Amino acid sequence: MLILRRRMGESVLLGDDIEIEVLEVAHGRVKLGIKAPPEVSVLRKEIQEAAAHNLAAARAVANGCLRRLMDTLRCSPAARR
């Protein structure tokens, strides 16, 4: 891991086309600006982890259970309204 110190307004370059700039530092928090080409995905780590967790949970649902749930919803009185 590379560790750098940057002040407000200073940047770090990743390759030729990604720039990370320190926009604000206040109350123990840092606001970063990231310039990257559209084909580069930029996500907060917790969002990526939540998406992976949700995908794993969705894959864990057995097809039979999903079919039974769909059948139940189709046959319920509320679904007929």
Image (tube, rainbow, N blue to C red):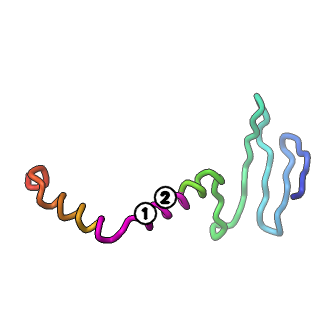
Residue under label 1, please give it.
58
Please report the bounds of the magenta region as a residue range: 51-65
Residue 58 highlighted magenta (yes or no): yes
The quadrant in which residue 27 appears is: top right
Task: Tell me which amino acid carries mark 1.
Answer: Ala
Task: Tell me which amino acid carries mark 2.
Answer: Asn
Q: Nearer the viewer, residue 81 or 61?
A: 61
Residue 80 highlighted magenta (yes or no): no
- Point out residue 47 in the picture as x, y percentages from the top left corner: 58, 53
> Does the CB distance between marks 2 and 1 fall below 8 Å?
yes
Q: Nearer the viewer, residue 9 or 2?
A: 2
- Left or right: 2 in relation to 57: right
Q: What is the spatial separation of the Cα atoms under label 2 and label 1, in whole angstroms?
A: 6 Å
Residue occupying the point 65% across, 59% down: 42
Crowding at dot 2, Cα within 10 Å, few <14 / some 14-19 / many 20+, comes out as: few
* Secondary element type, mark 1: helix
Crowding at dot 1, Cα within 10 Å, few <14 / some 14-19 / many 20+, comes out as: few
The quadrant in which residue 75 appears is: bottom left
- Point out residue 31 in the picture as x, y percentages from the top left corner: 73, 41
Residue under label 2, please give it.
54
